[in-house]
Image (cartoon, grey):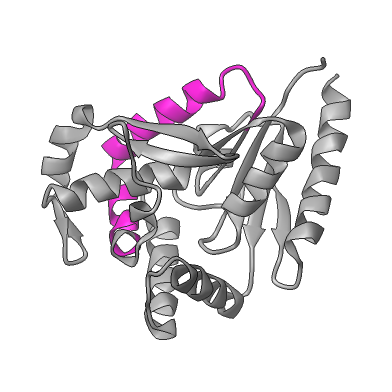
């Protein structure tokens, strides 16, 4: 078996990063790491502990309890489910309440440092597909393949709206639009590893692509890179 590469998938929220990353990992038989779920798990912990509320986060209090937070993934019927201190929280971390606070948690330097170390350790031996908002720029700057995903804001809003309602988490279209806009503003403007497209990242605009079409494009890129490194 040849060398296994690492693949970094970055981009704006609700562009289908996780979907593509999961599909790529399955096709290549690589491990999938959902870094967004890790930040959501920390956010859920903060909400449950009363450290986050009403769109605000007590940074000092959260930093103090970071050693008490452990995050892992439990493969369940082919999908990675996030475990927060051993408890499956996959459903809870996708709720709108978590979405409203996650960018505020994610901009805290100490949180990013803790999770970045966990993510880099997971990818140390290669064969990982990892998605998030600073994978190619900060977490895996040496990843052999970097993909930056984007889509029209209206398309992203509709996707997120449909996702929430399908999971029983109702929200208005305007609420979803504002949440995505605010997350973009925070993610691109934060001092600690902002969301950027690095120079060697391949751009994938999936506004008018099906999941099958975007996977075909990404797989072609992956196979091309894998052949070069053998």
Percent across and percent down for residue 91 are 38, 54
Q: Residue at x 45, y 50 (%)?
A: 194
Percent across and percent down for residue 63 are 18, 37
The answer to whether any part of residue 71 appears in the image is yes
In the picture, measured across the screen, residue 11 lies left or right of residue 56, that is right
Eyeballing the image, is 157 above or below 97? Answer: below
Q: Residue at x 27, y 32 (%)?
A: 85
In the picture, measured across the screen, residue 212 lies left or right of residue 121, that is right
Secondary structure, magenta segment, majority class? helix
Quadrant of the rendered image containing residue 65? top left
Percent across and percent down for residue 75 are 52, 34
Eyeballing the image, is 147 above or below 167? Answer: above
Q: Nearer the viewer, residue 197 or 149?
A: 149
Eyeballing the image, is 118 above or below 19? Answer: above
Quadrant of the rendered image containing residue 4? top right
In the picture, measured across the screen, residue 72 lies left or right of residue 145, that is left
Q: Residue furthest front?
A: 77
Quadrant of the rendered image containing residue 178? bottom left
In the picture, measured across the screen, residue 88 lies left or right of residue 23, that is left
The answer to whether any part of residue 199 appears in the image is no
Asked if the stretch drawn in magenta spans residue 119, the answer is yes
If the image is split into quadrants, where does the C terminus sit?
A: top right
Marks counted in the figure total 0
Q: Nearer the viewer, residue 19 or 64?
A: 19
Instruction: Give the extent of the magenta segment.
Output: 99-128
Eyeballing the image, is 91 above or below 166? Answer: above
Q: Nearer the viewer, residue 122 or 183?
A: 122
If the image is split into quadrants, where does the N terminus sit?
A: top right
Q: Nearer the viewer, residue 99 or 171?
A: 171
Asked if the stretch drawn in magenta spans residue 111, the answer is yes
Q: Residue at x 69, y 46 (%)?
A: 23
Q: Residue at x 56, y 32 (%)?
A: 140
């Amino acid at each position: 078996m040849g060398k296994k590469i690492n693949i970094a998938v970055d981009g704006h929220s609700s562009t289908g990063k996780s979907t593509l990353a999961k599909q790529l990992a399955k096709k290549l038989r690589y491990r999938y790491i959902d870094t967004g779920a890790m930040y959501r798990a920390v956010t859920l912990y903060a909400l449950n502990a009363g450290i986050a509320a009403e769109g605000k986060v007590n940074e000092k209090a959260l930093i103090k309890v970071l050693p008490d937070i452990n995050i892992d993934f439990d493969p369940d019927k082919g999908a990675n489910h996030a475990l927060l201190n051993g408890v499956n929280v996959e459903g809870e971390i996708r709720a709108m309440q978590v979405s409203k606070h996650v960018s505020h948690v994610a901009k805290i330097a100490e949180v990013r440092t803790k999770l970045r170390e966990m993510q880099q350790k997971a990818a140390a031996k290669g064969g990982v597909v990892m998605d998030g908002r600073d994978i190619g720029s900060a977490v895996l700057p040496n990843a052999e393949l970097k993909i930056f995903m984007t889509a029209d804001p209206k398309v992203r809003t509709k996707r997120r709206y449909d996702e929430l309602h399908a999971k029983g988490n109702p929200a208005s279209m305007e609420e979803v639009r504002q949440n995505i806009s605010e997350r973009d503003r925070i993610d691109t403007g934060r001092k600690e590893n902002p969301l950027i497209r690095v120079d060697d990242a391949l751009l994938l605009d999936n506004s008018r692509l099906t999941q099958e079409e975007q996977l075909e494009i990404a797989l072609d890129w992956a196979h091309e890179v894998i052949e070069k490194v053998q």
